Amino acid sequence: MLFKQQAWLRQKLLVLGSLAVGSLLYLVARVGSLDRLQPICPIEGRFGARSQAELPLRALQFKRGLLHEFRKGNASKDQVRLHDLVQQLPKAIIIGVRKGGTRALLEMLNLHPAVVKASQEIHFFDNDENYAKGIEWYRKKMPFSYPQQITIEKSPAYFITEEVPERIYKMNSSIKLLIIVREPTTRAISDYTQVLEGKERKNKTYYKFEKLAIDPNTCEVNTKYKAVRTSIYTKHLERWLKYFPIEQFHIVDGDRLITEPLPELQLVEKFLNLPPRISQYNLYFNATRGFYCLRFNIIFNKCLAGSKGRIHPEVDPSVITKLRKFFHPFNQKFYQITGRTLNWP
Ligand code: A3P
């Protein structure tokens, strides 16, 4: 009897022991792989300040914790400053295009440990009142970051606003500019859908897309309609090219960012001279949303808000054909200027 009990005890101890050793080995491997996966690397290339120092994951987590406490009012500005956190002007801006996927692009780039996003659209360069407040006002709107990191902001109105290229040029003539585009007709319908939703929320009636996009007198495409004009990408880009060389722009395929985000993000990492850090682990397809969502780590993941990925109204196919024919020559010019062919119809 005693012998049986001893054998049972020995067996239990053996199982417990191997479990403990196994968990320890797993933890060591896990921490090791996380540190390997997500160090902050120096940003090379045209971006001024460069440092060889790498920030370990723990420092990043500490920073996020500190900033969280700061926002809650539990940490002072001095404490934040003490840890080398600064508010930096953006080194890259997502200048447009509205409804191209600008939010998705910003959030996905923010997965990169060397990128810090400005959460809100700042509208500094397109809004005269904001612009008059000066560059320090703009800088103060930026999130805290380590000097080795880069800040990115997005304000899609920049792309189509006359004064913006010159104003951005005056701030930083070597800034990197990201433009995310979608097939022009789809983008115009997405633009219309957003406005329509706003009207419906206020219990207002609104015209059908067909009525706005086609001039009833000529039966031709209505180029006065803003949603149509915004989709003539080449016209807007030409204004920007008066200030910046084409090498300073990177075109993101917004349709591909929806279906296959990783390769698009890898192209952006390359353009920004960032080491490749965003991986398939960070992006997972959510069947309920019908879109890719973001995974920051084993605990934290998120999908974009419900206002991203609306259901578009049905549009008369003959209007779609007419619009596509209208955009075709502008698209060809856009491919030619940018060197990126997007196979739009
Ligand atoms: P729709 O609402 O027409 O589908 P923006 O952020 O510039 O306003 O762009 C909104 C568009 O981003 C959405 O347009 C949606 O298709 C697209 N998008 C791209 N990736 C997305 C994602 N992962 N989740 C939600 N929407 C995404």
Image: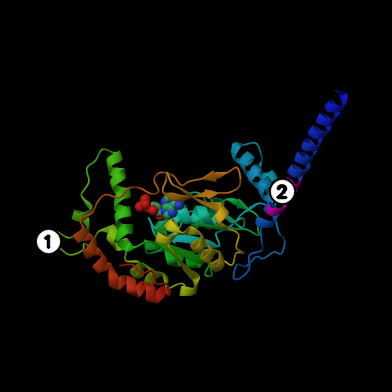
- Earlier residue among tags 2 and 1: 2
Q: Please give the name of the residue rendered at 45% of the width and 72% of the height, measured from the top-left corner.
A: 243
Residue occupying the point 64% across, 39% down: 69
Taking the view exactly as shown, the residue that stands out farthest to the right is 2
Question: 146 and 56: which one is in front?
Answer: 56
Q: Position of residue 120 (x, y in %)?
A: 48, 49
Badge 2 residue CB within 8 Å of ligand 1? no
Q: Main secondary structure of the magenta part?
A: helix
| Residues shaded magenta | 25-33
C-beta proximity under 8 Å, tags 2 and 1: no
Q: Kindly identify the amino acid type of the residue bearing the numbered disc 2.
A: Leu
Q: Secondary structure at mark 1?
A: loop
Nearer the observer, 73 or 327: 327
Disc 1: which residue: 217
Displayed quadrant of residue 210: bottom left
Q: Which mark identifies residue 12?
A: none
Residue pictured at 49% horizontal, 68% vertical? 169
- The picture quadrant where one finds residue 277 is bottom right
Q: Position of residue 300 (x, y in %)?
A: 58, 44
On-image quarter of the C terminus: bottom left
Amino acid under label 1? Asn
Q: Out of 311 and 208, give the one closest to the viewer.
A: 311
10 Å neighbourhood of mark 2: few (<14), some, or many (≥20)?
few
Q: For numbered disc 2, what is the local secondary structure?
A: helix
* Mark 1 residue's CB less than 8 Å from ligand 1: no
Residue tagged 2:
82
Which residue, as the protein is rendered here, is positioned at the far top?
A: 1
Taking the magenta stretch, the answer to whether it contains residue 31 is yes
